[in-house]
Every structure is written in structure tokens, then in C-alpha cells.
Amino acid sequence: MSTETKVREPTRSPAKTEHFDVLIVGAGISGVGGAYHLQQQCPDKSFVVLEQLDNFGGTWWSHRYPGIRSDSDLYTFGYRFKPWTSAPIASAEEILKYMGEVIEENDLSRHIRYSHTITHAEWSSKDNLWTLEAVRKDTGETVHFTAGFLWMCQGYYRQQKGYTPQWEGMADFKGQIVHPQEWPEDLAYKGKKVIVIGSGATAATLVPAIAGDVDHVTLLQRSPTYFVPGKNADELADTLRQLQIDETWVHEIVRRKRLFDQDAFTKLAVEHPDAVRAELLAGVRAFLPEDMVEKHFSPSYRPWRQRIAFVPDGDLFQGVIAGKASVVTDEIVRFTPKGILLKSGQELEADIIVSATGFNLNVLGDIDFVVDGKPLVFGDTVTYRGMMFTGVPNMVWVFGYFRASWTLRADLIGDFVCRMLKHMADKGAKKVEVALRPQDKDMPLSTWIDPENFNPGYLMRGMHLLPRRGDKPEWQHSQDYWREKDELPLIDLDDQAFRYS
């Protein structure tokens, strides 16, 4: 299936309201997976997927900067039901092709409506329905939907605009300032001097992707981050294929092995952070001299307090060694007409400055939510396992893992939603919401996630937008796939935390 394939439905009268049992918001990795699970496990349910972009894929469709690729391996980032058959780290094009095959093989395209921006969502307990208003970008028409259940798969950041800090003197710079999330298709960077501000996965991807074409590219970071260089291949998968093992089994075996190794690594990072730090830095030393590793690639924080980016074949470091790229660790004082003045007094000259500085947290897709006539203040709710929220009926939100692949949780929540829908049908219930139980009455509440354990900038900037968590497992987003894969399927849907009517 071509990644250009999209559904175009005829213009409808604005007065017409379509009804579906389930409405899925977003046709990215979570929404497409949700549509698959719903079709497979609840074939009696009608559903629609509304996507604001012009195509499926979410991040992999909207981000167009050079070299964009996954920072999670596709054996775990891919769906559990669809074998991944290529290299573990994949380009956006490869991921879109894979998702397109899922849509085509399962006839999901008939359920997806592209170019639909949802502006308003209102729940009525009188009718036990969500009513949604959306604007079609292709026609400008306002359309309306009702749904018994809302499945939020829209992600967690604002697609249209990335996060760029406001530095003094930005208006003085004579060149171009670009955020990777808004990369112009006609950006002429060949033969130019480029500065990439940032130290995360985007910067580590972008720098080697353009290093061969630019005059020089400088990665400018305030502080170092951890990287894992390695071969973009899986020896176990290659061996199993040599033995002519069926791809379904190759996918499952390699997936389990990778998950086992990731679990061990995560536990080791918590229990023996110094040993993990030494191992990570040794991987970088295989490419770069000691003084460079010490200055530019030795973070001050313990491993896994932020995501660790995989660098396939050490391409970032190879660009540095070849002299086409360099790394500067310093603080920005201000922008100048020619580039950036640093705290050290050094001025970096550039024709183009790329601010790979993260994104803006956007927890409910910029949708105006109302519950029984009252505006929803999402930050005032308490989360049930990071997917349901007190005072918000008939809604589940997919928020994936930080230390494991996003899709692992999307698959688990797909099972949960389908089980919940069947349970509601068995009970004859039209409404379900979560509420604190009597034993939770005096439970202390805190932020969505503990910043001592995980503290990337986008979360710290937007923590007030997220629901609160309690001190009990039911009222937290645990971020632990290895625990949740066993716990979520065993959730007692008749627990006091669930209220049906």
C-alpha cells in the first residue's frame, strides 16, 4: 500500500451527525493498532478513526527532516501481530510502508477519515454519548459525530509546532532558524554552515544525515546525553532466517529476546548506575578519543533519567572523526547576526541554525473537552494506570512507555479497551468511569511521573497539564512494561474503581 493512500469521502451536510460505537482519535501507530484490535476483538462494534493530518503515520508522516528514523527497535516498536522483517532501526519511510501494509491487509482504510481536526468534544451523562465537532481541512466543512466510547490515540505533543526557546538576539541572525518538526522541503543546506542545537535523538539523527552535504555541521549542546552505538542488525534474527524459520516465529523470538535484554538493562541502570554508565561510555570510546568522550559525551545524570538514543553503526561519531561534524558543549548567551555567541566567549558562525530542542506537550490534542456542561481541566483529574481518568467517562488514552517501545503499551491498551467494551455489553452498561475507592480517600497525590526517575524537558515544562497520580499502583502510570504485560490483562473490571451505569 502506498504511503500516499488516503480516504476521501464525499462532502456531507453540516447538519448530519454520524454515530459510531467507538471513535478513535488519531491514525498514528496507536490509532492504527487500535483499529486493528477493535476490528479483530469486537467485530460487532462500529468505529471511525479521525486524523487531522492528510495521511496515516502521525510522527512518521509529519516529520520531514533528513534522516528521520526510529530510536526504538522495530521488533518491539512494531505491532505484536505484524512481523518486522528489516533492520531493527528503521527510517520513517520504512515505518510508513509497514503501517500501510497493516491498513491494507486488514481493510482498515474504509474506517479512517483524514484531514479532520477535532475542535470540541462533549460528554452527556443524560445521553451516555460523546458528541464531537470537527473541521475538514480539505473542504472547510464542519462535521459532527457521536460515539459511545472515545479512544484517544493522538499522541502527546503538538504536531504543528515544535518547542524553541526564545534566546536574545534571534531576530538579529541573518540566516535561517528551523525546527526539525517544521522542516521546509526546499531548505537549501548543501554547502552551508549549520548549527544543530540539542543533544537528543533528533539531533543525533540529523547531524550525520546532513554531514556529507554541508560545509560543516556543529552539534551544540548545553549538556551531554547518553548514546548507544551499535550495528543496525540483529544476529539472532539473521541466524533464524538462515535456518528458514517462519517470519512470524522470527519476530516473536527476537521480540522476546530484546524485551528480556531491555528489562535486564533497565534494572541494572537503577541498581548499578555506575556500571551501566561505564558500559555506555565505553561504547562511545570505541569511536572517539578519551578527551572528547569526557568533555562531550559524559552526562552528569544517572542512566535512564532521560531516553537513551541508539546510534546505528556509530554514524554520529563517524561524522565527527571525519571532520564533517563537530560537537560543542557550552551555553548560549545570545544569537548574533553571524551565528551564536557562547558563554565561553566563542562565536559559532552559521548560515542555518536548527533548534532540535524538543516539542510542546499537548495532552488532549488541542480539543476543547466538556463533561456534563463543565470544561474538563485534565490536570485536576487522577489517572487510573495512565489510561483512564477520574470524572471522564467512556474514554481511554494511549500514553506509551519512556523506557520501552510506545507500541508495546498501545497493544496492551488495545486488549484492555476491547475487554472493557465486552464487559460493558455483558452488564448492559452504557457508561463507565473510574473513581477513587473508599480506601483511596486520603491517598496522597503528586505529579504524573516522579521527576527523580525521569525528567525530560517536555515533561517538566508541561507537567501541570497532566493528571495527577496516587501512591498505589492502580493510580499511577507505572512505565513498566514488564509488570504491566502481566497486570493489565488481569485487571478486575468489577473492582470498586470502576463505576458503571
Image (cartoon, rainbow, N blue to C red):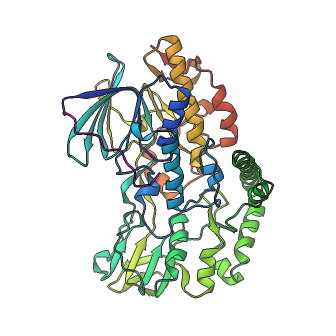
Query: In this orientation, does residue 447 appear?
Result: no
Q: Position of residue 313 (x, y in %)?
A: 66, 72
Q: Residue 360's quadrant in the figure?
A: bottom left
Q: Residue 350's quadrant in the figure?
A: bottom left
Q: Give the main secondary structure of the magenta stretch.
A: loop
> In the picture provided, is 80 more to the left or to the right than 161?
right
Q: Nearer the viewer, residue 247 or 362?
A: 247
Figure check: 474 above or below 97: above
Q: Tell me which residue sits at (44%, 55%) in the image.
A: 3
Q: Nearer the viewer, residue 178 or 447?
A: 178
Q: Position of residue 188 (x, y in %)?
A: 36, 79
Residue extending furthest toward the top? 428
Q: Tell me which residue sits at (26%, 32%) in the image.
A: 144
> In the picture provided, is 243 more to the left or to the right than 493?
right
Residue extending furthest toward the front? 244
Q: Position of residue 355 (x, y in %)?
A: 42, 70
Numbered-mark total: 0
Figure check: 201 above or below 383: below
Q: Is residue 13 magenta?
A: yes
Q: Which residues are magenta?
A: 1-14
Q: Position of residue 297 (x, y in %)?
A: 64, 73
Q: Is residue 357 magenta?
A: no
Q: Tell me which residue sits at (76%, 54%) in the image.
A: 268
Figure check: 500 above or below 174: above
Give the position of the C terminus as an image quadrant: top left
> In the picture provided, is 11 more to the left or to the right than 428?
left
Query: In this orientation, does residue 378 appear?
Result: yes
